[in-house]
Structure formats: structure tokens, C-alpha cells
Image (tube, rainbow, N blue to C red):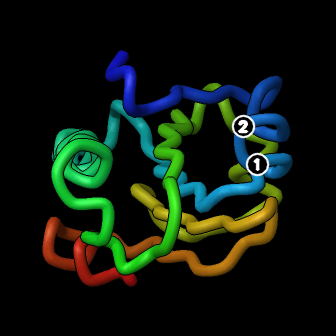
Amino acid sequence: MNALIIDTTDATFVSEVLQSDIWTLVLFWDKSCNLSKELVPVFNALASTYNQNNPNILDLSGPVKFIRAHIDENKRHYLDFKPGHLPAILLFKDGQLIRTTGDKEMSKTILLTFF
């Protein structure tokens, strides 16, 4: 696990995402989904870039928590938020869903322009 990214489960989703008081970017993904497998390294690189080199890359003020939520370990919360296709990216602030995307055609460009 990348130290900059937290892998969550249904048991930890509330404390890591819904009770967080900072920006929280959640990637719902599945290891059987090829697009998910392609996006996870991009998500990891974004976390590294944001935290180490350029805290303004996402145009968000303050720290950002990066969460990977594998669908098999986060079924309840995936169903609660119904983000659509996998992979799906959700942005939270103070436990509130701010923005979401779930598009089969998601790419690095879409991820970086999501904001």
C-alpha cells in the first residue's frame, strides 16, 4: 500500500471518508475491470504528485486524503452512493459528497480535469 493512499473497507469507510473533515477523493474500483486496473496507477501518481510536489494540482485548498475502495470490500457504500460504472471517482468534503464521476471512458485526462 502506498503511504499516501488509504485502502478502505465497509468497516472503515465511515471513519475515513464520511467523518473526515478534509477533502477526500475516493476511487471505487474492481480488480476484474481493465479500466480500473489502468486507473489505479494514475490515481496513485496523482496522490504522490499532490502530496509531494504540487498541492494545488487539484485546485483544492488544504490537504486531500486519497482513498481506494475496492468494490468487493466496499459493497455497502458503493450501493449507497450509486456512482455508476467502475471505476468511479467521488469527491467529499466534511463527509458530504461534492462531486462524482463514473464513466466507462474515464482516462487520465478526465481524472486530471475532473475538478
Inter-mark Cα distance, 1 to 2: 6 Å
Callout 1–callout 2 Cβ contact below 8 Å? yes
* Nearer the observer, 25 or 55: 55
Frontmost residue, 54 versus 5:
54
Q: Please name the residue that numbered disc 2 is placed on.
A: 16
Position in image of residue 66 (x %, y %): 47, 45
| Residue of label 1 | 20
Q: Quadrant of residue 52?
A: top left
Q: Is residue 25 left or right of residue 48?
A: right
Q: Residue at x 38, y 75 (%)?
A: 103
Q: Secondary structure at mark 2?
A: helix
SS type, badge 1? loop
Determine crowd level at label 1: few under 14, some 14-19, many 20+ residues with C-alpha closer than 10 A.
Answer: some
Please indicate whether residue 80 sits to the left or right of residue 68 in the image.
right
Residue 25 horizontal/vertical position (percent) = 52, 57
Question: At 56% from the left edge and 70% from the top edge, which residue is drawn?
Answer: 84
Q: Residues within 10 Å of mark 2 (few under 14, many from 20)?
A: some
Q: Amino acid at mark 1?
A: Ser
Image spot of residue 112 (x, y percent): 23, 73
Q: Position of residue 90 (x, y in %)?
A: 56, 65
Answer above or below: position of 7 versus 38.
above
